Each structure stands twice: as structure tokens, then as C-alpha cells.
Amino acid sequence: VRYWIKMISRAILMVICFIIAVSVPGFGSLVDLIGATAVMFLQIIFPVVFFLVLERKRVKLGFKPSYGSAVSKYMQYVVMGISLVLAVIGMIFGTWSAILNW
């Protein structure tokens, strides 16, 4: 596909998104609510959970763990636990704030 066709289609798509965002009342509040919940799941919670599940399966299959020593193993778990707690707290406050500002 030619380069200029891609550029025109992207520009048209951006104009359509802009028109929807401007014309739908309360669209910003909806985006706030979806962003407060979905971003924390996609950016923090899912990667940590997927890593833990895949690491457990990897060790069960007989491969060496991805961490070097027991200390680094526990540090990984501490950092992941703190990340999960902060993500859940941020998600709760973000959702609460989006609902209050609706």
C-alpha cells in the first residue's frame, strides 16, 4: 500500500475520533472511568500475574528460575507485591475520582 494512502486514512480516522469526542456529551468522564480501571490492569496487574504464572510453570517443567539467588527471588516477590498493592489502590482511587466527577 502506498505511503500517502496510509497517511490519508490515519488523518481521516483522527478526524472521526475528534468529532466523536467533541460531539458526545460526557465522553471525557467515560474515558476517565475506563482509563482508571483498564490502565492499571493492563500496565501493572496483568504483567505481574502473567509473570508469576509463567514462572511457576517454567519451574514445574524443570527449567531454572529466572532469578539468581533466593534473596533476589524474595526481592522480586516483594517488589511485585508492592506494585500490585499500589496498583489496586491507584485503581480504586482513580475509579472513585472518575465516578465523583461524572
Image: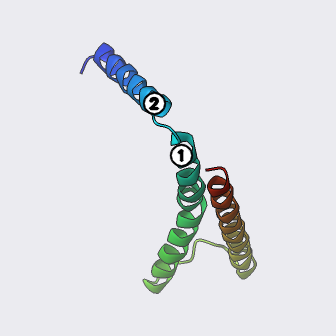
> Residue 58 versus residue 100: which sits nearer the camera?
100
Q: Is 24 left or right of 5, judged from the image as shown?
A: right
Above or below, 28 relative to 22: below
Above or below, 42 relative to 7: below
Label 1 neighbour load within 10 Å: few <14, some 14-19, many 20+: few
Tag 1: residue type? Val
Q: CA distance from mark 1 to mark 2?
A: 14 Å
Within the image, what quadrant is residue 75 found in? bottom right
Residue 23 at x, y percent in the picture: 45, 30
Mark drawn on residue 14: none
> Residue 94 versus residue 75: which sits nearer the camera?
94
Question: Looking at the image, do the residues carrying marks 1 and 2 touch, with CB atoms under 8 Å apart?
Answer: no
Tag 2: residue type? Ser
Q: How many marks?
A: 2
Residue 90 at x, y percent in the picture: 69, 61
Above or below, 96 relative to 72: above
Q: Is 97 left or right of 7, judged from the image as shown?
A: right
- Which circle's residue, 1 or 2, is located before the other in the chain? 2
Residue 100 at x, y percent in the picture: 67, 56
Write down the residue under mark 2.
Answer: 23
Residue 56 at x, y percent in the picture: 51, 81
Display coloring: rainbow
Within the image, what quadrant is residue 9 found in? top left
Q: Secondary structure at mark 1?
A: helix
> Residue 93 versus residue 83: which sits nearer the camera?
93
* Residue for point 55% across, 62% down: 41
* Residue for point 53% across, 65% down: 46
Above or below, 44 relative to 11: below
Label 2 neighbour load within 10 Å: few <14, some 14-19, many 20+: few
Write down the residue under mark 1.
Answer: 31
Q: Is 32 left or right of 7, judged from the image as shown?
A: right
Q: Nearer the viewer, mark 1 or mark 2?
A: 2
